């Protein structure tokens, strides 16, 4: 496993549901070779885990922040252990 690979756990609050957030995250992750998952939460927020280089994860988040209809008012980020077996970025079922 590449030693530069990290994993981050995010919670996003704001206008993040019903605006294509999960699909935009999946597309950006694919573009920047980031793996992980994203899902809507019952309280209107979105949860995401992203694994890749710090630079590529930052690019995914920047893509989301710069998206036309998405408004991120609050973002919580925590470090997680990388998963050496993960190979894709997926949209998880809601809630």
Image (cartoon, rainbow, N blue to C red):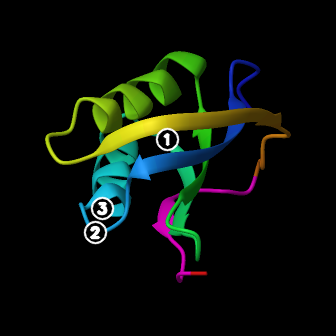
Mark 3 neighbour class, 10 Å CA radius: few under 14, some 14 to 19, many 20 or more = few
Q: Marks 3 and 1, how far apart in space?
A: 14 Å
Q: Which residue appears at 30% of the width and 40% of the height?
A: 31
- Secondary element under disc 1, as helix, strand or loop, is loop
| Quarter-of-image position of residue 67 | top left
- Secondary element under disc 2, as helix, strand or loop, is loop
Q: Using the image as rendered, state which of residue 68 and residue 93 is in the foreground.
A: 68
Say above or below: 63 vs 50.
above
Q: Marks 1 and 2, how far apart in space?
A: 23 Å
Q: Which residue is mark 3?
A: 23
Asked if residue 28 lies left or right of residue 40, the reply is left
In contact (CB < 8 Å): disc 2 and disc 3: no
Residue 57 can be seen, yes or no: yes
Q: Which residue appears at 58% of the width and 77% of the height?
A: 42
Range drawn in magenta: 85-94
Q: Which residue appears at 40% of the width and 39% of the height?
A: 72
């Amino acid at each position: 496993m590449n030693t530069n690979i990290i994993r981050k756990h995010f919670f996003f609050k704001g206008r993040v549901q019903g605006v294509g957030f999960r699909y935009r995250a999946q597309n950006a992750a694919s573009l920047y070779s980031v793996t992980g998952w994203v899902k809507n939460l019952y309280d209107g927020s979105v949860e995401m885990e992203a694994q890749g280089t710090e630079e590529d994860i930052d690019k995914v988040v920047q893509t989301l922040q710069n998206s036309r209809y998405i408004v991120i008012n609050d973002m919580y980020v925590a470090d997680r252990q990388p998963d050496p077996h993960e190979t894709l970025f997926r949209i998880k079922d809601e809630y």
